[in-house]
Amino acid sequence: MDQSQALLALAALGQATRLQLFEMLVPRGRAGMSAGAIAERLGVAPSSLSFHLTQLVHSGLLVQRRFGRQLIYSADPAVMGELLDYLDAQCRATETVA
């Protein structure tokens, strides 16, 4: 992961609704949830939810797939792992400079 990708992911998670959404989807694994179910659980208006989902998909933290007429969203653990690796590498680089 490069710096621009890390910034996208961190910015996406830096908003309360998106962080709650991501936290809700992580334990659901690949099964994920439909946009309607997410909106209901979070109590978010569909138009607002659509914006938040777009931000998380754009950052790579969520994956969107079609199942019949529904859009299903799931967290991408590989991208979160890359983000954590990136942050860890930055912290380690700082330790060697200090």
Image (cartoon, rainbow, N blue to C red):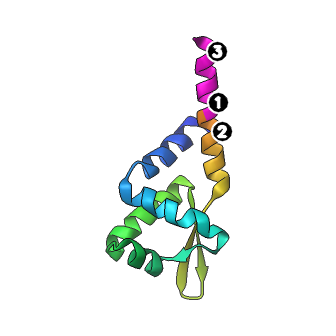
Question: Is there a contact, CB below 8 Å, between mark 2 and mark 3?
Answer: no
Q: Is residue 91 magenta?
A: yes
Q: Residues within 10 Å of mark 3 (few under 14, many from 20)?
A: few
Nearer the N terminus, badge 1 or badge 3?
1
Nearer the N terminus, badge 2 or badge 3?
2
Whole-percent x, y for residue 43 in the image:
34, 74
Q: Residues within 10 Å of mark 1 (few under 14, many from 20)?
A: few
Whole-percent x, y for residue 38 in the image:
45, 74
* Distance between the alpha carbons at the discs numbered 2 and 3: 17 Å
Question: Is there a contact, CB below 8 Å, between mark 1 and mark 2?
Answer: yes
The residue carrying mark 3 is 96
The residue carrying mark 1 is 89
Q: Which residues are magenta?
A: 88-98
Q: Residue at 58% across / 35% down in the picture?
A: 87
Q: Disc 1 residue type?
A: Ala
Q: Residue at 54% across / 88% down in the picture?
A: 69
Whole-percent x, y for residue 34 in the image:
52, 78
* Distance between the alpha carbons at the discs numbered 1 and 2: 6 Å
Q: How many marks?
A: 3
The answer to whether residue 48 is above or below residue 22 is below
**Foreground pick, 18 / 52:** 18
The residue carrying mark 2 is 85
